[in-house]
Image (cartoon, helix red, strand yellow):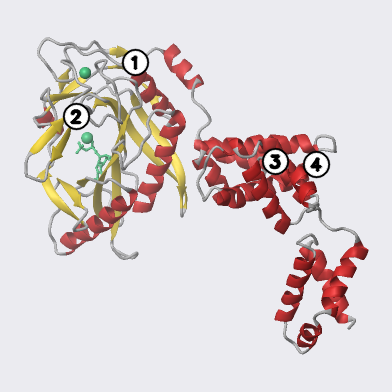
């Protein structure tokens, strides 16, 4: 759809998150994502045998409360479970235990970054339910069912229809994924089905207040797919409306092979599920005390970390900040090194500007050179270089005791040999050359042996200057500061 289209895009999301718990939602079967053998983690309760009784998994309730709090939601003191009745081969009980009118969390919101600035999306509710099993379709046409997943604790989050583009949807989903991981309530991997996103999308004419008829899109298992499905669905609906047609309220699935959405079924209204209170479970009461305790257990969240990295360490580049926000372990290493940098400065006057300079240098070396040595993979760097040594390395560069060329050599040795930088510099004789006379001698001798480069330079061939610098750096084994070499060389060339 073109930018100046006559329609506004309206999107609301329903997101399922597999809750990280030891056992299933209503029985003591293991929640083991790595179990490859089918139907191992099953019992009469999650298989829905008559006469069995479900029991609420309190660890799962703690998880959903924590996520609700992190999403600025109200936590209900009174909640209850309901049966959502439908038939499907992966649903052994013939119903799913879910929550209908009293969800655990209500009325939250999440604000997150987009291209156009900060966007706030309202969250209608988060409720607790259980997952269904998994159907396995074999190549010979037979289908099998694996109930290991049946009954796992599942959190459903429903947003208000506040999104207006795929970009907003994806940024929201990525921030939610990060929050779930910080809280340790879900791994939230889309590829593994731990986070499943359903997109509800409608169009309305610009300026129109009433929302249009929505279509629900399922089978979206990556951010890329979400982007493609939204683009396709906007086009499809716009075309129908352009021709004066009406949109059918339905569920469509995204077909990866064809890259289009295909109608699956007309959407049920909630009354078709015949919701009724789960008779085998008493209402769940959540005390203020429990909420308070859980609030106290919420760690620093991504947005808090972004602000702190900027305020406490003076980091300015959003890309650098994001590397640390996305990788908790790397951020921890960065902060440990930063503390050590402060220790190195301690004997001198604490100068905030200088400290921020050092930290900026540190962040650069971490995210480019160190990451490069690990082939871009974030590993446990303290195993390779203890934070104290990395801090010392940064201080040496900042004090001009080694230049950036030498720094690369030193860092590689620190990484491979686990030695501290001062010893490496001493052992290899890498200390920067500061003696003016010696620098002069080296440059003079390079000039003497390259008369043609000098005359080329004098005749306007600027590349010769770079060539001479290269010779000087080689002759000094990289020990002259390149800026110093440039300065002395241009002075000398002018006087020739
Ligand atoms: P239903 O009863 O059909 O499930 P809900 O009101 O529960 O509908 O909303 C389901 C999801 O659809 C929510 O994420 C909501 O934000 C979104 N939604 C509701 N109406 C619209 C609309 N007209 N256009 C786009 N999304 C919508
Ligand atoms: Zn079970
Ligand atoms: Mg609904």
Secondary element at tag 4:
loop
Instruction: Nearest to the eye among marks 3 and 4: give it.
Output: 3
Residue 308: tell me if it is visible.
no
Q: Give the mark nearest the N terminus, 2 or 3.
A: 2
Percent x, y of residue 279: 16, 12
Dot 3 or dot 4: first in sequence order is: 4
Q: Which residue is mark 3?
A: 419
CA gap, disc 3 and disc 4: 29 Å
Query: Is residue 237 placed above or below 424 in the rendered structure?
Result: below
Pointer 4: what residue?
Answer: 351
Residue at screen point 43% across, 41% down: 175
Q: Regarding mark 3 in the picture, which secondary structure is present there?
A: loop
Mark 1, residues whose alpha carbon is within 10 Å: few (<14), some, or many (≥20)? Answer: few
Label drawn at residue 58: 1
Quadrant of the image occupied by residue 146:
top left
Instruction: Kindly report the distance in space between the C-alpha atoms of the residues bearing marks 2 and 1.
Output: 26 Å
Q: Does residue 216 appear in the picture of this structure?
A: yes
How many angstroms separate mark 3 from mark 1 (CA)?
49 Å
- Which label was assigned to residue 38? 2
Question: Residue 242: where, in percent of width, then height?
Answer: 18, 64
| Residue 52 versus residue 128 in the image, above or below | above
Mark 4, Cα crowd under 10 Å, few <14 / some 14-19 / many 20+, is few
Q: Earlier in the sequence, mark 4 or mark 2?
A: 2
For numbered disc 2, what is the local secondary structure? Answer: loop
Check whether the beta carbons of the residues at disc 4 and disc 2 lie within 8 A of each other: no
The Cα atoms of the two marked residues, 4 and 2, are separated by: 62 Å
The CA span between labels 2 and 3 is 50 Å
What secondary structure is marked by label 1?
Answer: helix
């Amino acid at each position: 759809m073109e930018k100046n289209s006559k329609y506004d895009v309206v999107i609301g999301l329903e997101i399922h998150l597999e809750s990280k718990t030891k056992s299933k939602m209503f029985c003591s079967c293991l929640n083991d994502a790595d179990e490859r053998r089918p139907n191992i983690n099953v019992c009469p309760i999650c298989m829905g045998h008559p006469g069995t009784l479900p029991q609420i998994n309190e660890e799962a309730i703690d998880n959903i409360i924590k996520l609700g709090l992190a999403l600025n939601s109200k936590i209900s003191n009174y909640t209850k479970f309901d049966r959502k009745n439908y038939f499907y081969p992966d649903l052994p009980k013939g119903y799913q235990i879910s929550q209908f009118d009293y969800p655990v969390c209500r009325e939250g919101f999440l604000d997150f970054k987009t291209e156009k600035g900060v966007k706030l999306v309202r969250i209608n509710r988060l409720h607790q339910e259980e997952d269904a099993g998994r159907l396995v379709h074999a190549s010979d046409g037979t289908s099998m069912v694996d109930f290991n997943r049946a009954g796992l604790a599942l959190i459903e989050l429903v947003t208000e229809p506040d999104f207006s583009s795929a970009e907003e949807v994806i940024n929201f989903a990525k921030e939610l994924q990060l929050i779930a991981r910080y809280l340790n309530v879900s791994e939230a991997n889309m590829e593994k089905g731990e986070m499943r996103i359903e997109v509800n999308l409608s169009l309305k004419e610009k300026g129109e207040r009433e929302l249009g008829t929505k279509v629900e899109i399922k089978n979206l298992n990556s951010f890329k797919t979400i982007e493609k499905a939204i683009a396709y669905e906007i086009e499809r609906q716009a075309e129908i409306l352009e021709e004066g047609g009406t949109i059918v309220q339905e569920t469509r699935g995204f077909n990866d092979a064809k890259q289009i959405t295909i109608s699956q079924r007309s959407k049920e209204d909630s009354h078709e599920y015949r919701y009724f209170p789960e008779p085998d479970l008493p209402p769940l009461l959540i005390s203020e005390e429990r909420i308070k305790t859980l609030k106290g257990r919420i760690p620093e969240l991504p947005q808090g970390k972004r602000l702190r990295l900027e305020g406490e360490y003076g980091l300015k580049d959003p890309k650098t900040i994001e590397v640390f926000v996305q990788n908790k372990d790397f951020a921890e290493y960065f902060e440990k090194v930063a503390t050590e940098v402060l220790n190195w400065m301690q004997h001198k006057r604490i100068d905030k500007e200088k400290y921020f300079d050092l930290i900026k240098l540190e962040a650069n070396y971490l995210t480019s050179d160190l990451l490069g040595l690990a082939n871009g993979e974030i590993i446990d760097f303290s195993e390779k270089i203890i934070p104290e040594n990395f801090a010392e390395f940064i201080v040496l560069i900042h004090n001009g005791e080694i230049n950036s060329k030498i720094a690369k050599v030193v860092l590689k040795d620190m990484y491979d040999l686990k030695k501290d930088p001062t010893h490496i510099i001493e052992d290899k004789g890498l200390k920067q050359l500061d003696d003016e006379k010696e620098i002069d001698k080296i440059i003079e001798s390079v000039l003497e042996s390259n008369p043609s480069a000098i005359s080329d330079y004098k005749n306007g061939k600027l590349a010769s200057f770079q060539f001479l610098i290269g010779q000087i750096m080689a002759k000094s084994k990289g020990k002259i500061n390149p800026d110093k070499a440039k300065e002395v060389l241009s002075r000398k060339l002018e006087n020739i």
